[in-house]
Amino acid sequence: MKNILYMVRNQLCVIAFLVVMFLIIVSGNKKEELITYNVSSINSIQAVHLVSKYNPEVVETIYASNIQEVLQYGKTNPVIFNGTMTGYGPDCVGCTGKVSCPPRNDVRNGNIYFQDNDYGMIRIVAADKSIPCGTIVKVTGNRLSEEMVAIVLDRGGVIKGTLMDLLMPSERSSISFGRQNVAYEVVRWGW
Protein backbone atom coordinates (compact mmCIF):
# COMPACT_ATOMS: atom_id res chain seq x y z
CA MET A 1 0.00 0.00 0.00
CA LYS A 2 2.88 2.31 0.78
CA ASN A 3 4.37 1.64 -2.65
CA ILE A 4 1.07 2.46 -4.38
CA LEU A 5 0.77 5.83 -2.56
CA TYR A 6 4.41 6.57 -3.40
CA MET A 7 3.79 5.84 -7.14
CA VAL A 8 0.57 7.92 -7.18
CA ARG A 9 2.38 10.82 -5.52
CA ASN A 10 5.23 10.60 -8.07
CA GLN A 11 2.77 10.48 -10.97
CA LEU A 12 0.92 13.54 -9.60
CA CYS A 13 4.22 15.38 -9.30
CA VAL A 14 5.10 14.51 -12.90
CA ILE A 15 1.64 15.60 -14.12
CA ALA A 16 1.87 18.86 -12.13
CA PHE A 17 5.35 19.48 -13.56
CA LEU A 18 4.09 18.89 -17.12
CA VAL A 19 1.08 21.20 -16.60
CA VAL A 20 3.33 23.98 -15.24
CA MET A 21 5.78 23.58 -18.16
CA PHE A 22 2.89 23.66 -20.63
CA LEU A 23 1.55 26.89 -19.09
CA ILE A 24 5.01 28.47 -19.18
CA ILE A 25 5.49 27.55 -22.83
CA VAL A 26 2.02 28.77 -23.83
CA SER A 27 2.32 32.08 -21.96
CA GLY A 28 5.81 32.74 -23.36
CA ASN A 29 4.69 32.21 -26.94
CA LYS A 30 3.26 35.70 -27.40
CA LYS A 31 4.40 37.40 -30.58
CA GLU A 32 5.81 40.89 -30.19
CA GLU A 33 6.06 43.20 -33.14
CA LEU A 34 9.29 45.12 -33.38
CA ILE A 35 8.86 48.37 -35.28
CA THR A 36 11.97 49.93 -36.74
CA TYR A 37 12.51 53.05 -38.80
CA ASN A 38 14.92 52.76 -41.71
CA VAL A 39 16.74 56.09 -41.50
CA SER A 40 18.90 55.34 -44.54
CA SER A 41 15.88 55.33 -46.86
CA ILE A 42 14.56 58.78 -45.95
CA ASN A 43 15.50 62.28 -46.96
CA SER A 44 18.38 63.71 -44.97
CA ILE A 45 16.25 66.42 -43.36
CA GLN A 46 13.90 63.72 -42.00
CA ALA A 47 16.87 61.93 -40.47
CA VAL A 48 18.03 65.20 -38.94
CA HIS A 49 14.57 65.77 -37.44
CA LEU A 50 14.52 62.19 -36.12
CA VAL A 51 17.90 62.68 -34.43
CA SER A 52 16.98 66.12 -33.07
CA LYS A 53 13.74 64.73 -31.62
CA TYR A 54 15.72 62.47 -29.28
CA ASN A 55 18.84 64.58 -28.83
CA PRO A 56 18.15 68.24 -29.58
CA GLU A 57 21.70 69.35 -28.72
CA VAL A 58 23.12 67.41 -31.68
CA VAL A 59 21.38 69.38 -34.43
CA GLU A 60 21.23 73.14 -34.74
CA THR A 61 17.96 74.63 -35.94
CA ILE A 62 18.58 77.44 -38.40
CA TYR A 63 16.33 80.49 -38.16
CA ALA A 64 16.28 81.77 -41.71
CA SER A 65 15.45 85.38 -42.44
CA ASN A 66 14.85 85.04 -46.19
CA ILE A 67 14.20 82.47 -48.91
CA GLN A 68 17.90 82.28 -49.88
CA GLU A 69 18.79 81.03 -46.39
CA VAL A 70 15.89 78.57 -46.49
CA LEU A 71 17.25 77.17 -49.76
CA GLN A 72 20.82 77.12 -48.44
CA TYR A 73 20.09 75.19 -45.21
CA GLY A 74 16.72 73.50 -45.87
CA LYS A 75 18.15 70.25 -47.25
CA THR A 76 20.43 69.51 -44.31
CA ASN A 77 19.21 71.34 -41.19
CA PRO A 78 15.91 72.01 -39.52
CA VAL A 79 14.92 75.44 -40.80
CA ILE A 80 12.36 77.77 -39.29
CA PHE A 81 11.38 80.94 -41.09
CA ASN A 82 8.70 83.60 -40.86
CA GLY A 83 6.44 84.14 -43.80
CA THR A 84 2.96 84.95 -44.96
CA MET A 85 0.07 82.62 -45.72
CA THR A 86 -2.93 83.34 -47.89
CA GLY A 87 -5.70 81.09 -49.16
CA TYR A 88 -6.85 80.08 -52.61
CA GLY A 89 -9.46 77.79 -54.10
CA PRO A 90 -9.27 75.35 -57.00
CA ASP A 91 -11.76 77.58 -58.84
CA CYS A 92 -9.61 80.72 -58.67
CA VAL A 93 -8.95 82.80 -61.78
CA GLY A 94 -6.26 81.00 -63.78
CA CYS A 95 -6.54 77.78 -61.74
CA THR A 96 -7.09 74.46 -63.51
CA GLY A 97 -8.49 72.59 -60.51
CA LYS A 98 -5.48 70.31 -60.39
CA VAL A 99 -2.33 70.83 -58.34
CA SER A 100 0.80 71.34 -60.43
CA CYS A 101 3.07 68.87 -58.59
CA PRO A 102 2.91 65.11 -59.07
CA PRO A 103 0.65 63.20 -58.55
CA ARG A 104 -1.32 66.20 -59.89
CA ASN A 105 -4.45 65.57 -57.82
CA ASP A 106 -7.74 67.00 -59.00
CA VAL A 107 -8.93 69.19 -56.11
CA ARG A 108 -12.12 70.55 -57.66
CA ASN A 109 -14.09 68.08 -55.53
CA GLY A 110 -13.24 70.08 -52.39
CA ASN A 111 -10.55 67.67 -51.23
CA ILE A 112 -8.03 70.02 -49.65
CA TYR A 113 -5.98 67.22 -48.04
CA PHE A 114 -3.25 64.86 -49.24
CA GLN A 115 -2.55 61.41 -47.79
CA ASP A 116 1.22 61.26 -47.23
CA ASN A 117 2.87 57.93 -46.41
CA ASP A 118 4.90 59.43 -43.56
CA TYR A 119 2.72 62.26 -42.23
CA GLY A 120 -0.80 61.01 -42.87
CA MET A 121 -3.63 63.32 -43.93
CA ILE A 122 -2.22 66.83 -44.32
CA ARG A 123 -3.18 70.12 -45.98
CA ILE A 124 -2.01 71.21 -49.44
CA VAL A 125 -0.13 74.47 -50.03
CA ALA A 126 1.29 76.29 -53.01
CA ALA A 127 4.85 77.57 -52.57
CA ASP A 128 7.70 79.29 -54.38
CA LYS A 129 9.11 77.19 -57.25
CA SER A 130 12.46 77.03 -55.47
CA ILE A 131 10.90 74.93 -52.67
CA PRO A 132 10.62 71.40 -54.09
CA CYS A 133 7.35 69.54 -54.53
CA GLY A 134 6.67 67.17 -51.65
CA THR A 135 8.25 69.45 -49.04
CA ILE A 136 6.48 69.14 -45.69
CA VAL A 137 6.15 72.20 -43.46
CA LYS A 138 4.71 72.73 -40.00
CA VAL A 139 2.81 76.00 -39.88
CA THR A 140 2.18 77.87 -36.63
CA GLY A 141 0.49 81.15 -35.97
CA ASN A 142 -2.43 80.84 -38.33
CA ARG A 143 -6.10 81.03 -37.36
CA LEU A 144 -7.04 77.54 -38.56
CA SER A 145 -5.37 75.63 -35.77
CA GLU A 146 -2.50 75.87 -33.34
CA GLU A 147 -0.16 73.87 -35.59
CA MET A 148 -0.84 72.62 -39.10
CA VAL A 149 1.20 70.24 -41.23
CA ALA A 150 1.10 70.90 -44.97
CA ILE A 151 2.71 69.59 -48.16
CA VAL A 152 3.88 71.67 -51.11
CA LEU A 153 1.91 70.32 -54.07
CA ASP A 154 1.14 73.45 -56.03
CA ARG A 155 2.65 76.60 -57.52
CA GLY A 156 1.24 80.00 -58.30
CA GLY A 157 2.26 82.98 -60.36
CA VAL A 158 2.36 85.34 -57.38
CA ILE A 159 3.64 82.80 -54.82
CA LYS A 160 7.19 84.00 -54.27
CA GLY A 161 9.72 83.84 -51.42
CA THR A 162 8.25 83.01 -48.02
CA LEU A 163 4.62 83.38 -49.11
CA MET A 164 2.60 80.15 -49.20
CA ASP A 165 -0.97 79.74 -50.36
CA LEU A 166 -3.25 77.32 -48.45
CA LEU A 167 -5.69 75.33 -50.57
CA MET A 168 -9.29 75.96 -49.49
CA PRO A 169 -12.46 74.23 -50.73
CA SER A 170 -13.32 77.22 -52.94
CA GLU A 171 -12.10 80.69 -53.82
CA ARG A 172 -15.06 82.13 -51.94
CA SER A 173 -14.03 80.34 -48.70
CA SER A 174 -10.47 81.59 -49.06
CA ILE A 175 -11.55 85.22 -48.76
CA SER A 176 -12.25 84.89 -45.03
CA PHE A 177 -8.80 83.36 -44.48
CA GLY A 178 -7.14 86.63 -45.41
CA ARG A 179 -3.41 87.24 -45.16
CA GLN A 180 -1.65 85.92 -42.06
CA ASN A 181 1.84 86.13 -40.63
CA VAL A 182 3.02 82.61 -39.77
CA ALA A 183 6.13 80.60 -38.94
CA TYR A 184 7.16 77.69 -41.14
CA GLU A 185 9.34 74.76 -40.11
CA VAL A 186 10.68 72.52 -42.88
CA VAL A 187 10.12 68.92 -41.78
CA ARG A 188 10.90 67.20 -45.08
CA TRP A 189 12.69 68.67 -48.07
CA GLY A 190 10.99 67.41 -51.23
CA TRP A 191 10.02 63.82 -51.94
Image (cartoon, rainbow, N blue to C red):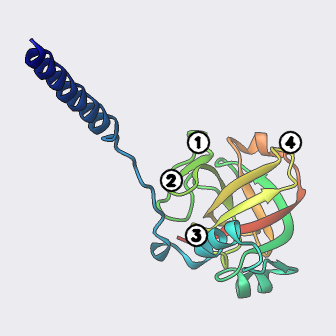
Q: Residues within 10 Å of mark 4 (few under 14, many from 20)?
A: few
Please say if 138 is above or below 9: below
Residue with the most extreme front position: 2
Q: What label sits on residue 79 in the rendered view?
A: none
Q: Nearer the viewer, mark 3 or mark 2?
A: 3
Q: What label sits on residue 105 in the rendered view?
A: 2
Element class at badge 1: loop
Disc 3 designates what residue?
Answer: 133
Q: Please name the amino acid that badge 1 sits on.
A: Asn
Q: Is residue 189 visible?
A: no
Q: CA distance from mark 1 to mark 4?
A: 18 Å
Q: Earlier in the sequence, mark 2 or mark 1?
A: 2
Q: Nearer the viewer, mark 4 or mark 3?
A: 3
Q: Please name the amino acid that badge 4 sits on.
A: Ser
- Residue at 78% x, 45% y is 174
Q: Earlier in the sequence, mark 3 or mark 1?
A: 1
Q: CA distance from mark 3 to mark 1?
A: 18 Å
Quarter of the image for residue 157 reads bottom right
